Image: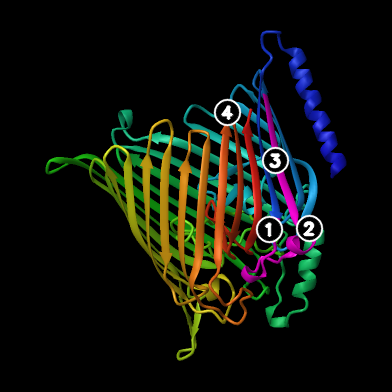
Amino acid sequence: MKHFSIVMLLVLLGTCNWALGQSKDSDKGQFSGNLLLTYQKYVRDDSIGANTKVYKENTASADAWLFMQYRIKGYSFILRYDAFNNSPLLDPQDAYTNHGVGFWQINKSVDKLDITMGSFYDQFGTGVLFRAYEQRQIGIDYAIQGMRLKYNINDKWAIKGFAGNQKGNIKNRFGFAKQVISGLNIEGNIDLGKDSKYGALQVGASAVNRTLDRETMDRLVGTINTYDLADRFYPKYNVYGGNAYLTYTKNNFSWTVEGNVKSKEAIMDDNTKFYLKSGNVLYTSMSWGKSGWNLGNHTASVGLNVQARHVDHFSFRTAPTENLLNGLVSYLPSMTRQNTYRLLSRYNAPGQAMGEDGIQGEIEFKPRKGTQIFFNGSYVQTLASNGKLNMATGVKEAEKLFSENYLEVVQKIGKHDKLKLGVQRIVYNQTRYESEPEYVPVKTFTPFGEWLHTMNQGKSLRVEWQYLNTKNDQGSFANLMIEMFVNKNLSIAVADMVNVAPHRYERMIIADKVLHYPTFFIGYTEKNTVFTLAFLKQQQGVNCSGGICREEPAFSGVRFTVSSNF
C-alpha cells in the first residue's frame, strides 16, 4: 500500500503539473489545504482504568492529516495524507502504526456532467440507506474509492450513480474492502403552484447494491454449516436496498418522510449467530416556527421540532462478518439529543440496527429579547423481536432503552453577562447498550449551569458546572470548569470532575474511592493556526460524534494539537 500511495502522489502531482502547463500565465489556479495533528503522551493511572496497551508499551502516539486541494479550469485535485503512529484512535484497545494516502480525488465538470474518480464522500437522502462519511474523533472513515457521475438534468433535477469499494477498516486503513458497492439516486425539486404558492417538494429515490467477494462467502458458508440443520440457510452474494423520500416546505413549516428497505441477507444477532432477514427503516420529522408574535409588551418567537424513527433489522455493512463500527454502509445515528457538557453527555443512545422505535421532540421559546427557554424530550425502546422475554407469558416484549428530559433557560443580564440554568433527567439501559448483564438501568438527575461574562478587547470569563446524581454505574459526579479568554488569541481553562459518591460493580476495574478527573488547558490562535495543550483525565464511557458512538477506555496524559488552514 505504501507503493500505491507513492504512485498516487506522483500521478496527482503530474496531473496538476499538466493542468498548470495548459493554463495561461494569468490563470495559475487556486491551492488550499489544512493540517490537523494530535500528539498524546500517556500517563498510566490504574485507579481510573487508564492502563491499556498504549500505557504499557508505547507511552505516546501521534495522528496527522494533511489535506491539499488544487483547483484550475473546472478541475479539482485533492490529496490527503494520513499518518498514525502507535495510535489508539482506530481501536482504543490497541496501537496502530501506518501512513499513506488516505484520500485522493480528481473531479471535473463538463457542461451538465460532474465526473469524480478516486475517493469521495456522499449520501442518499438522510443517509440511512447509504452514507460515505468521516468522523475523525472516533476514528472512522467510510470513504468510497471508485467512480461517481452526476448529471444535472436541469436546474431542479439531478441523477447520480457510483461504484467502488469502501475504504479499509481499523486493521487495513490504507487498503479497501473487497466487496463492491454501487448505487443510483435521482433527486429534484417541485414547486406547488406559481412561485411555490402552495409550498415546495424535494423528492428523491435511490437504489444500492452490495456484492460479496468469494473469500467472505466461503467463510460465511463455513460458519453456517456448523449450525444445526434447522438453523442453516443459503447466504446471498448480493443484497439490494432502496429508498424514497420527500420534504415538503411552506413558509415556516417543514415535513420530511423517508422509507428504506433492504433485501434478505445474512445478518449477525447479539450472540454472533447468523440468520437470513430483510430489513426496513421508516423516518419522519416535522418542524415549525413563528416569530414576531406579540406577547404583552414583548415580541416572542417559538420553534417546534419532532422526529421519529422505526428500525427493523437494518444492519447494512460491507460484509455480514463485520461488527462494531467496521464496514458500515448505512447511517443510523442516535435519535436523542447530542449534549456538549461533560456530564450531560455521559450517557448516550447509539442507534440499534437490530430494531428500535425512537421519538424526540424539542421546543424553543423566546418570550422576550434576552430570554430563551428550551425543552427536549426523547424515548427509545427495542422492538418486540429483539426485546426482553416475559418469563410469565413466554413472549418477547419491547424493552425500554433510553429516555431523556432536558430543560434549559438562558437569560441575558445587562450588556456583558449571560446566565444559563437547566436540568436533565436520563434513564439508560446499561445492560443492553454495554452488554453488561450485571448492571441495572442507570437513572440520573443532573442540574447544570453556566455563567458568561464578556469584557473589552476580546476578554471573557466562563464558568460551567454540573452535578450528575445517580446510585447506579460509577455513582454520582460533580464537574466545575473555569475558562478565561485572556484576549482574542489566548484562552486558559481549568476543570475538575469528581466522583463524589462512588458506586462500583464487581467487574469494574477502577478504584473504589473518590476519583478526580482534572483538566488543565491552554489554547493559542495565530492567524489561521490553532495550538492547544492540555493535561487531562477522562473516565471510561461511550463517546459519540455525529450521532455515532463507541465505547472508549479511560484517558490520562498530555494532549497537544495543531490545526492550520492555508
Q: Please identify the quarter of the rendering in which residue 449 is found.
A: bottom left
Where is residue 511 shown, x and y percent of the image? 60, 75
Measured in 3D between alpha carbons, the distance from the residue under mark 4 to the one under mark 2, in whole angstroms, is 34 Å
Please tell me whether mark 2 or mark 3 is closer to you in this view. Answer: 2
Say if the magenta span includes residue 370: no
User: What residue did someone put label 4 on?
Assistant: 527
Q: Please identify the quarter of the rendering in which residue 561 is found.
A: top right
Q: Amino acid at mark 2?
A: Asn
Q: Amino acid at mark 4?
A: Lys
Q: Earlier in the sequence, mark 4 or mark 3?
A: 3
> Seen in the image, is 114 located left or right of residue 414?
right
Measured in 3D between alpha carbons, the distance from the residue under mark 1 to the one under mark 2, in whole angstroms, is 25 Å
User: What residue did someone put label 1 on?
Assistant: 326
**Which residue is at the front of the view, 562 or 139?**
562
Q: Mark 1: few, some, or many residues within 10 Å (few <14, many ≥20)?
A: some
Badge 3 marks a residue whose secondary structure is: strand
Q: Residue at x 63, y 55 (%)?
A: 240
Q: Is residue 168 among the parts visible in the rendering?
A: no
> Seen in the image, is 232 located left or right of residue 392?
right
User: What residue did someone put label 2 on?
Assistant: 58
Where is residue 340 shown, x and y percent of the image? 47, 53
Badge 4 marks a residue whose secondary structure is: loop
